[in-house]
Image: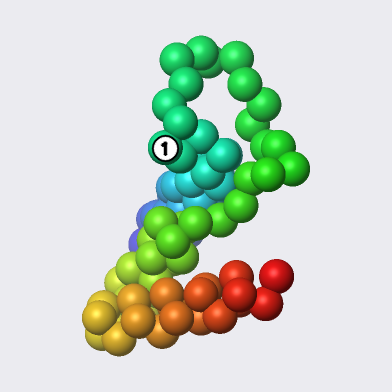
Amino acid sequence: MAVILALESFLFLIIMLGAIAGDIIGSVYEGNNIKTKDFPLFSPHCHFTDDTVLTVAIADALLHDRDYAELLKQYYLGSTIYSLRD
């Protein structure tokens, strides 16, 4: 049973990292679709987006059995405040 839980945790981590990395990598192309597969994964202009923040909020709600709506508000408002500081 412990092995199964460890594997599920590992898979969840890999999925989350993939979702977050994909969003950050694609952030520079948002609204400007490209057709090539030859592009840099991370550029100096890459950044996290609201999709990143809300994905983490949903994961937090699922993992800790918390209210989705409340966490979405908290995470989104926190990310807005953070981005305004830059």
In the image, 21 versus 77, the foreground residue is 77
Would residue 70 be found to the left or right of residue 36 on screen?
left
Residue in view at x 44 percent, y 61 percent: 50
Q: Which residue is mark 1?
A: 31
Callout 1 secondary element: loop
Q: How is the image coloured?
A: rainbow
Q: Is residue 44 above or below residue 79?
A: above
Please state if 36 lies on the left or on the right of 41 as rendered.
Answer: left
| Count of numbered tags | 1
**Nearer to us in this view, 48 or 2:** 48
Residue drawn 43% across and 26% down?
33
Measured from the top left, where is residue 47 in percent x and y?
61, 52
- Three-letter amino acid code of the residue under disc 1: Gly
Q: Position of residue 73 (x, y in %)?
A: 35, 81
**Label 1, residues with CA under 10 Å away: few <14, some 14-19, many ≥20:** few
Residue located 56% across and 80% down the image = 81
